[in-house]
């Protein structure tokens, strides 16, 4: 079934049957932590069963009333969370987040990453800065744009050698992601806590754990498993992986190969708190 037919079925189900989940599913992720993978699976589920689905790319104070809600950067006002929801929180070794982010930002066509609009005379909006950073002050946004020295984020990172490029990523998108990870409050959430590395090393078992946690019906569970099976990297060809812009490789601990001694020391001096928080 092509995408247009899926969307038509989705809207018909919503209109005719008002299909809603009793308890919403909230997925809390971060950049390069399997967001595309989980997003695709739960979007397919929503299209199949007429659930409302929404991705939030930045900070929100009001929680949308939908069946499946994806916080792409886990930026949330905890006081606004409903009393009952099914929560899934996925993290990754922040050093690998930096490396994957560096490789991704060298080639992505995301608008903010290739933005060349550096005006500061009126309020700065996306795509001048990423959606995830729109909550920042205007002074912060101006300083960020000026720090690029007239280049897009991508142009800047591609103008550097690998060591300097990783250092740049570490102090920009990588740092912003680490800040979000450090803000996560385990005591104010009720989530299944997962590591991306476990998903990659034992994909089928962890995916079943995720889907079982979501309290799906037998039919929904079987459908979700069939979608998840198609996204299993271990079953993809090398060409399929190379053609996916969101996958740089299937390996974990890439940072061990990419971090220079200087970058490793810098990370340890500035970001060791996040390793302790998540036991990396």
Image (tube, grey):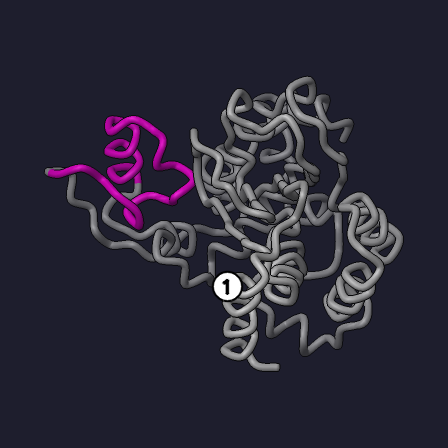
Binning the other alpha carbons within 10 Å of mark 1 as few (below 14), some (14 to 19) or many (20 upward) gives: few
Q: Residue at the spot x=65%, y=25% of the render?
A: 274
Residue 16 x, y percent position in the rendering: 54, 65
Choose between 156 and 66: the one closer to the eye: 66
Q: Quadrant of residue 140?
A: top left
User: Relative to 202, is 189 on the left or the right?
Assistant: left
User: Relative to 3, is 275 on the left or the right?
Assistant: right
Residue 163 x, y percent position in the rendering: 54, 45
Residue found at the far left of this picture: 121
Q: Is residue 115 above or below residue 262?
A: below
Which image quarter holds the N terminus? bottom right
Report the number of numbered marks: 1
Residue found at the far top of this picture: 187
Give the residue at mark 1.
Answer: 15
Q: Secondary structure at mark 1?
A: helix
User: Relative to 248, is 107 on the left or the right?
Assistant: left
Choose between 203 and 248: the one closer to the eye: 203
Which image quarter holds the C terminus? top right
Residue 103 x, y percent position in the rendering: 55, 55
| Magenta highlight on residue 210 | no
Please state the extent of the stretch shown in magenta in the rendering: 122-147
Q: Quadrant of residue 242?
A: bottom right
User: Relative to 263, is 125 on the left or the right?
Assistant: left
Q: Residue at the spot x=56%, y=74% of the render?
A: 6
Choose between 110 and 192: the one closer to the eye: 192
Q: Residue at the spot x=60%, y=69% of the render?
A: 244
Q: In this view of the protein, can residue 214 be seen by the observer?
A: yes
């Amino acid at each position: 079934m092509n995408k247009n037919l899926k969307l038509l079925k989705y809207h018909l189900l919503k209109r005719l049957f008002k299909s809603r989940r009793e308890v919403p599913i909230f997925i809390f992720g971060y950049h390069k932590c399997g967001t595309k993978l989980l997003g695709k699976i739960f979007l397919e589920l929503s299209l199949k069963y007429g659930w409302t689905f929404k991705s939030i790319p930045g900070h929100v104070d009001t929680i949308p009333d939908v069946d499946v809600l994806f916080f792409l950067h886990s930026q949330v006002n905890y006081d606004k969370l409903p009393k009952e929801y099914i929560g899934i929180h996925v993290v990754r070794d922040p050093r690998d987040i930096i490396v994957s982010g560096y490789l991704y930002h060298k080639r992505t066509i995301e608008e903010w990453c290739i933005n060349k609009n550096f005006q500061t005379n009126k309020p700065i909006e996306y795509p001048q800065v990423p959606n995830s950073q729109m909550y920042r002050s205007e002074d912060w946004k101006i300083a960020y744009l000026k720090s690029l020295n007239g280049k897009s984020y991508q142009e800047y990172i591609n103008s550097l050698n690998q060591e300097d490029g990783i250092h740049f990523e570490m102090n920009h998108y990588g740092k912003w992601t680490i800040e979000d990870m450090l803000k996560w409050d385990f005591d104010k959430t009720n989530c299944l806590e997962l590591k991306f590395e476990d998903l990659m090393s034992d994909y089928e078992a962890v995916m079943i754990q995720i889907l079982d946690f979501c309290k799906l019906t037998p039919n929904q569970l079987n459908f979700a498993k069939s979608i998840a099976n198609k996204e299993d990297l271990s079953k993809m060809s090398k060409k399929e992986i190379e053609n996916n812009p969101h996958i740089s490789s299937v390996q974990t601990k890439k940072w061990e190969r990419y971090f220079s001694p200087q970058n490793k020391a810098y990370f340890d001096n500035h970001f060791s708190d996040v390793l302790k928080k998540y036991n990396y």
